[in-house]
Amino acid sequence: MGERKPLIGITTDLYDRDGMLTFRVSSHYSAMVERAGGEPVHLATMGTGVCDFARYDGFVLTGGDDPVMEGFGVPTSEHSVRVLPERQAFETELLGYLHAHDGVPVLGVCLGMQMMALTSGGTLNQHLPDTHDTHGIHWEHEHGIVSVDEGVMVSGEVRSKHRQAVDDPGGYRVLARAPDGVIEAIDDPEARFRVGAQWHPERTAFEPLGFGLFDRLVRASRG
């Protein structure tokens, strides 16, 4: 028998389909995890107390709609497309578990990165069009990012889709920014692998900032 594949939990989006709560997630996430040698498992993001987080070797926190901010001490922007409360409750509980277990590898994508920052005391810019004339490059466009430390993360082209961004990363450090100053990546240097990417690595062609992040996650999840 071969070596056991690391079990990677992938959060799913939750939306209201004609009154029925329905899960959905892009197949790109699981395809990247499988390519990297992991075993992807889609998680039912249905509120608190529904998942045994300890059975997973690593996690991918996927993209989605915008966080509801009242629980973080500020009003939610009128421009926000609010994530459903069941999903936010689930991911808040998951991140609480992960903050207490920094040996568990995590890749946070877009909303996932934003939730990482918020649950560690950070803040969000809730509407980039109010503050950045360049906001258009962040919505379904490729653009460059500039690394703070090329030895940890390289600079390159990424694919983004977001109208919000992390203003303050809280307990994380900034790894990279867009040319307009928007924070594009964060990490916890004390953790085995804990990285947030504001872009979508599952749809990024430049391999070190696309598949490469999933490869690093799965390698770290092997223990």
Image (cartoon, rainbow, N blue to C red):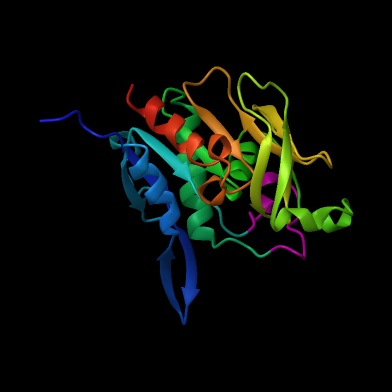
- State the extent of the magenta-drawn residues as a range: 66-80
Out of 9 and 207, give the one closest to the viewer.
207
Residue drawn 76% across and 65% down?
79
Residue projecting furthest to the left: 1
Query: Looking at the image, is 222 positioned above or below residue 75?
Result: above
Considering the whole magenta stretch, tell me its main secondary structure.
loop
78 relative to 42 in the view: left or right? right
If the image is split into quadrants, where does the C terminus sit? top left
Tell me where residue 169 sits by quadrant. top right
Query: Looking at the image, is 190 positioned above or below residue 132?
Result: above
Tell me where residue 113 sits by quadrant. top right
The spot of residue 74 in percent (x, y) is 75, 49
Residue drawn 63% across and 44% down?
114
Q: Is residue 97 magenta?
A: no
Residue drawn 58% across and 41% down?
206
Task: Tell me if I can see residue 127 in this picture.
Answer: no
The spot of residue 133 in percent (x, y) is 89, 54
Q: Is residue 68 magenta?
A: yes
If the image is split into quadrants, where does the N terminus sit? top left
Residue drawn 49% across and 68% down?
15
The spot of residue 55 in percent (x, y) is 28, 36
The spot of residue 107 in percent (x, y) is 50, 37
Out of 164 and 76, give the one closest to the viewer.
164
Task: Tell me if I can see residue 68 in this picture.
Answer: yes
165 relative to 14 in the view: left or right? right
Out of 175 and 49, give the one closest to the viewer.
175
Query: Looking at the image, is 196 positioned above or below residue 65?
Result: above
